[in-house]
Image (spheres, grey):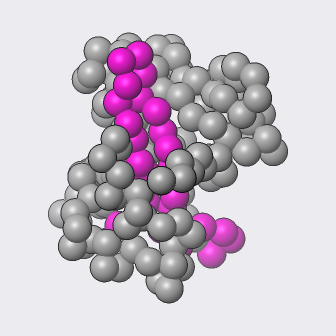
């Protein structure tokens, strides 16, 4: 089976304490929950999603999580695919819901929230908040500035304990 490596290419638009309505600036508390098989029915390219999340969901070495507004778990704001390794959490893929992309997006802070969750998972698994991912070249500086990521060469970036704590404090996780 061919192993696909995705390069992370999502803009971290704003670091908020939850997610924020772009028009009203109202903040909404969020939950990050495991994606279910039932959720996959609406997460399709036909519905505007860019990646094949069903394929990602079926990979045994990773878990897919959905970001939802608390008490509204039917509307998925974004998704992240993570793998816990012995020394960090590896972020395979992250994507905002189609309605949270571009100039007409509904909510800001979705991607940052999902990255903060990856940091929380890393602490829970005893890897000190370390999260690694591979990014598109054009966004490497963006992740260094916005997230405090460390560029290890090539496409590899790492969030260390300090960067992870900053994100957790911002998102109150």
Above or below residue 77? Residue 85 is: above
- Image coordinates for residue 79, horizontal then vertical, percent: 41, 57
Please give the name of the residue rendered at 48% of the width and 27% of the height, measured from the top-left corner.
Answer: 131
Do we see residue 105 in this rendering?
Answer: yes
- Image coordinates for residue 19, horizontal then vertical, percent: 43, 54
Please give the name of the residue rendered at 41% of the width and 63% of the height, measured from the top-left corner.
Answer: 55
Query: Farthest residue in the bottom direction?
Result: 46
Do we see residue 145 in this rendering?
Answer: no
Of residues 116 and 85, the one nearer the viewer is 85
Q: Is residue 96 left or right of residue 147?
A: left
Q: Is residue 84 magenta?
A: yes
Query: Farthest residue in the left direction?
Result: 71
Please give the name of the residue rendered at 54% of the width and 53% of the height, measured from the top-left corner.
Answer: 2
Above or below residue 11? Residue 55 is: below
Please give the name of the residue rendered at 70% of the width and 19% of the height, measured from the top-left corner.
Answer: 152
Query: Farthest residue in the front direction?
Result: 1
The dominant secondary structure in magenta is strand
- Image coordinates for residue 149, horizontal then vertical, percent: 63, 25
- Image coordinates for residue 104, horizontal then vertical, percent: 63, 75
Q: Is residue 72 magenta?
A: no
**Quarter that holds the C terminus:** top left
Q: Which residues are magenta?
A: 75-104
């Amino acid at each position: 089976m061919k192993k696909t490596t995705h390069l992370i290419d999502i803009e971290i638009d704003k670091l908020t304490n939850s997610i924020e309505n772009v028009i009203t600036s109202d903040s909404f508390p969020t939950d990050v929950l495991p994606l279910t098989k039932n959720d996959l029915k609406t997460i399709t390219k036909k519905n505007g999603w860019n990646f094949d999340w069903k394929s990602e969901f079926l990979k045994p070495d990773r878990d897919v999580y959905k970001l939802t507004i608390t008490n509204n778990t039917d509307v998925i704001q974004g998704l992240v695919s993570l793998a816990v390794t012995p020394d960090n959490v590896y972020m395979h893929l992250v994507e905002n819901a189609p309605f949270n992309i571009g100039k007409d997006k509904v909510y800001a802070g979705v991607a940052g929230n999902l990255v903060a969750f990856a940091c929380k998972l890393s602490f829970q698994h005893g890897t000190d908040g370390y999260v690694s991912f591979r990014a598109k070249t054009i966004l490497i500086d963006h992740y260094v500035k916005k997230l405090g990521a460390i560029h290890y060469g090539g496409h590899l970036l790492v969030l260390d304990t300090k960067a992870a704590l900053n994100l957790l404090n911002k998102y109150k996780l």
